[in-house]
Each structure stands twice: as structure tokens, then as C-alpha cells.
Image (spheres, helix red, strand yellow):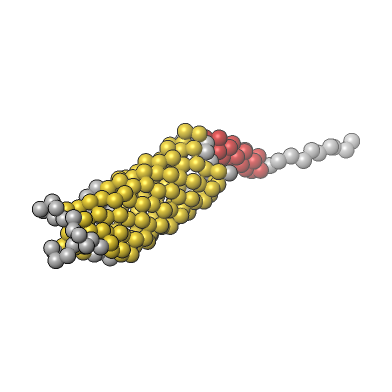
Amino acid sequence: MPLALAAGPTPTEAVTTEEEEEEEEEQQEQKDIRRTKGLVLRGYAKVGTATLPGIGVGGGLSVGYLRKHFRLDLMGSGRINRSTWYPQGEVGGDFALWRAGLRACAVFGSGRVSTPLCGGADTGMVTASGVGIDSARTQRQPWASVFADVDLAWHLLPQVALVTTSRWLVPLARRNYYVGNRGTLVTTPPFGVEIGLGLELVLP
């Protein structure tokens, strides 16, 4: 009497299939918690030295692309004018900084929290204007720096995150600023630190 044989998966194939199914389930769960691929828009406010006089306040916008553990951002930011004075307190200068930069990030995360670790460079313009004198001049100097960022994003929704960021930056050139013949008013320090808070939107 002939025997009927039924073809079925081998033990190795069965294990492989189960592992693939588990991986797909994990990816789907992760997607439900936070998006890991898409266009990323961010708006933020920040405070820090930014290598200009004292601690200043500013903000910016960025647009980027996220794909699982890799991210690339194009960023633009500005710092509100800040005044610095000579010891007498009557003559000084107003300083502002506008810049654009590019950074690349390795993105780590678990659940609702992700941590991009980034490195990049930016370029822009420092505007310095004399204050307290009749013939005050405005001087513009090019700006460039390299930086490292550590971000922490908490995803309120899969596509929306609250973000804190910290930046350590090193200017590529140090400059002295002065008003008339009164001597140096400001010297660009060798490094700067900034911290910020913002919102991020990940579009599919």
C-alpha cells in the first residue's frame, strides 16, 4: 500500500520563521510608539554662551531625515542681541549671531525615548554694533564652528516628541572686538555650551 508523505518545514525553518515573526512584531510595536523613519521638523529655544559675551537666548528651526538608527539634519538658528559694556558702563557693543549648519546622528532608543548622538559644523555671521558713541559702526564677521550634540527625545505621540538638547562647540577662529581706541571689549572664548528645549514632528 503506497504511503502518502506530507512536506512540512524543517525544525530550522520553523525557528527562522518564528524569529522573523517576532522581529516584525517588535518593529510594529516600536512604530506604534514612535516613528523611526520620515521627514523630521524641529523648532527649539536655547540658552548658552555660543562663544559670544555672557549667556544669551536664541532659537532655531531644523529639517532632517530619519531612517531607523541614522539621522541627518539641516539647522538654522539665531541669538538675540546681547549688550556688553566697558567697565565705565557708558560705552559698549551689541552682539548677535546667525548661523546655519549640518549634522549627522546615530540614533539610539527604547520605547518612547530616543537619544540622537550627533556631530556637525556650522557657519554664519556675527554682527557687532557700537553703543554709547556718536559715530557708532556695525561690523560683521564670518563665523564657523564644529560641534557635538546630545539630544533626548520623549515621544508624546508616535509623530510628536518633546526634545532637550545640549551642544558643545569650538569656534574655528577667535576674534577681538573693540570700540574706538578703548581697547578690547570682547574676545571670542575657545569653546561654548548651549542647552535647548523644543518640539519635534516626524512626518511619514
| 80 displayed left or right of 134 | right
Q: The N terminus appears in which quarter of the rendering?
A: top right
| 131 displayed left or right of 7 | left
Residue 102 in the image: state x and y as whole percent: 43, 57
In depth, the one of 17 and 7 nearer the eye is 17
* Above or below, comparing residue 187 to residue 194 in the picture: below
Residue 155 in the image: state x and y as whole percent: 46, 36
| Residue located 24% across and 64% down the image | 175
Q: The C terminus appears in which quarter of the rendering?
A: top right
In depth, the one of 172 and 17 nearer the eye is 172
In depth, the one of 22 and 49 nearer the eye is 49
Q: Residue furthest right?
A: 1
Task: Residue 67: tell me if it is visible.
Answer: yes
| Residue located 61% across and 41% down the image | 20
Q: Residue furthest front?
A: 134
Residue 125 in the image: state x and y as whole percent: 34, 61
| Residue located 37% across and 41% down the image | 197
| Residue located 45% across and 45% down the image | 42
| 152 displayed left or right of 1 | left
| 82 displayed left or right of 89 | right
* Above or below, comparing residue 54 to residue 24 in the picture: below
